[in-house]
């Protein structure tokens, strides 16, 4: 039973770490898109 609990805890931890990395990646993509839109609007004004 102890081994099963340890394995389950390891899987849950791995899932949480993977989710954090995914959310961080999405945040970086959104930021890059916002930067590109800002740059395009600056160029359009000039």
Image: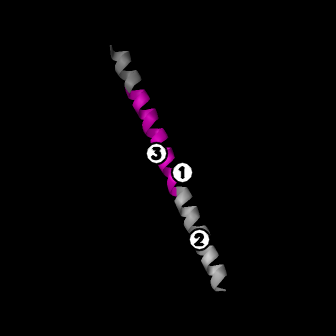
Label 2 secondary element: helix
Give the colour scheme shown: one colour
Query: What residue lies at 38% left-to-right and 28% top-to-bottom?
Result: 38
Give coordinates of residue 40: x percent, y percent: 41, 22
Q: Please indicate whether residue 46 sits to the left or right of residue 27 in the image.
A: left
Q: Quadrant of residue 2?
A: bottom right
Q: Which residue is mark 1?
A: 22
Among all residues in the image, which is located at the extreme top?
46
Q: Is residue 40 above or below residue 15?
A: above
Disc number placed over residue 10 in the picture, else none: 2
Query: What residue lies at 65% left-to-right and 81% top-to-bottom?
Result: 3
The magenta segment:
20-38
Query: What residue lies at 54% left-to-right and 57% top-to-bottom?
Result: 19
Give coordinates of residue 1: x percent, y percent: 67, 86
Label 3 secondary element: helix
Q: Distance between the Cα atoms at labels 1 and 2?
A: 18 Å
Mark 2 Cα within 10 Å, few/some/many (few <14, many 20+)? few
Q: Which residue is mark 3?
A: 27
């Amino acid at each position: 039973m102890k081994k099963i609990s340890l394995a389950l805890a390891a899987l849950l931890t791995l899932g949480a770490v993977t989710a954090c990395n995914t959310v961080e990646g999405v945040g970086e993509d959104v930021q890059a898109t916002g930067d590109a839109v800002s740059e395009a609007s600056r160029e359009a004004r000039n």
